[in-house]
Amino acid sequence: MYTLTGLKPKNPIILAAGILGTTGASLCRVAREGGAGAVVTKSIGPVPKTGHPNPSMVRLDGGFLNAMGLPNPSYPDFLQELEIAKKDSGVPVIASIFGGTAAEFSEVAEGLLPGKPDAFELNVSCPHAEGYGAAVGSSPCLVEAITAAVKDVTNLPVWVKLTPNVSDITCIGTAAESGGADAVVAINTLKGMAIDIESGYPILGNRSGGLSGKAVKPVAVKCVYDLYSALEIPVIGVGGVTSWKDAVEIMMAGASAVQVGSAVYDRLDIFSEISTGIEAFLRRKSYSDVKRLIGLSHEMV
């Protein structure tokens, strides 16, 4: 049976944070209709946030540029949605959380425990929320302290989602591991910007945002590859995965599981499609288990 940090996803293809994770009903839909092996909620913080002004998302040739600004109702008001997802989704539910300090992270984690999430994913990587995300996730010391603070209030698995907008992602991954992380998730979006050439104005309401989609896949593959070499804990790959071939590639780089985000924009059943493709690939290659794919490219050096 496939396991990941003690969890038992139905398959290794997981809904990424921030995509259809605002309500319990949408999380259940992704699991039931889409075929996701597990689901991650929208990032939830210590206080309500309305997010950045519109336009907050634009489609580009190579993906999407977004500056949502971590809108969320805060953890007390999200408990009901978490309970619905836990009751009806039939898959592990991972609560994505954020804060500006280690104390805020532990506060949110503790506040969501009554909703019985299966694990926590720490968002120390969002590139467009001032005072949150990458603002704290670019410091190894802060990442270690935040991870340790959450581990102090729960025995649940803790995943730490890393930003690629640093000089060396392995330093941040090592800090998360030192803080007690059970896995790291790589990567979040890349800093980006788009300008309307007729008016000269930045298109996003926040001016800049985070780039996701096909364009970032090579960056994700490299980050996963480097983290796999540097860490003892599992790496969960995310970034630009739109097909089973993409998923296989990022697993060969070292990912124990693969999260899918932007690709859900085009089709909800992307999770089932990828899982079916991987299974067919395993049969064609005479691999007995999906674990055979994890880190395979490292054996070829």
Image (spheres, rainbow, N blue to C red):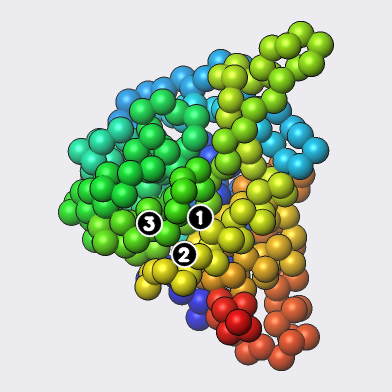
- Give the quadrant of the C terminus: bottom right
Residue 199: image x %, image y %?
A: 76, 8
Camera-nearest label, 2 or 3: 3
Residue holding disc 2: 227
Specify the farthest residue to the front: 167
- Report the Cα–Cα distance between label 2 and label 3: 9 Å
Residue type of the residue flagged with mark 3:
Cys
Q: Badges 1 and 3: C-beta atoms under 8 Å apart? A: no
Of callouts 2 and 1, the N-terminal one: 1
Of callouts 2 and 3, the N-terminal one: 3
- Left or right of 275 on screen, residue 167: left
Which residue occupies 64% across, 42% down? 212
Camera-nearest label, 1 or 3: 3
Q: Does residue 220 appear in this view? A: yes
Tell me: residue 211, above or below residue 240: above
| Crowding near the residue tagged with mark 3, few <14, some 14–19, many ≥20 C-alpha atoms within 10 Å | some
Residue 228: image x %, image y %?
A: 48, 69
Which residue occupies 41% across, 26% down? 130
Which residue occupies 71% across, 47% down? 215
Which residue occupies 25% across, 57% down? 179
Of callouts 1 and 3, the N-terminal one: 3
| Crowding near the residue tagged with mark 1, few <14, some 14–19, many ≥20 C-alpha atoms within 10 Å | many
Q: Nearer the viewer, residue 15 or 172?
A: 172
Residue type of the residue flagged with mark 1:
Ala
Residue 100: image x %, image y %?
A: 30, 33
Q: Quadrant of residue 207?
A: top right
Residue type of the residue flagged with mark 2:
Leu
Q: Badges 2 and 1: C-beta atoms under 8 Å apart? A: yes
Residue holding disc 1: 186
Circle 3: element type: helix
Residue holding disc 3: 171
Q: Nearer the viewer, residue 111 or 210?
A: 210
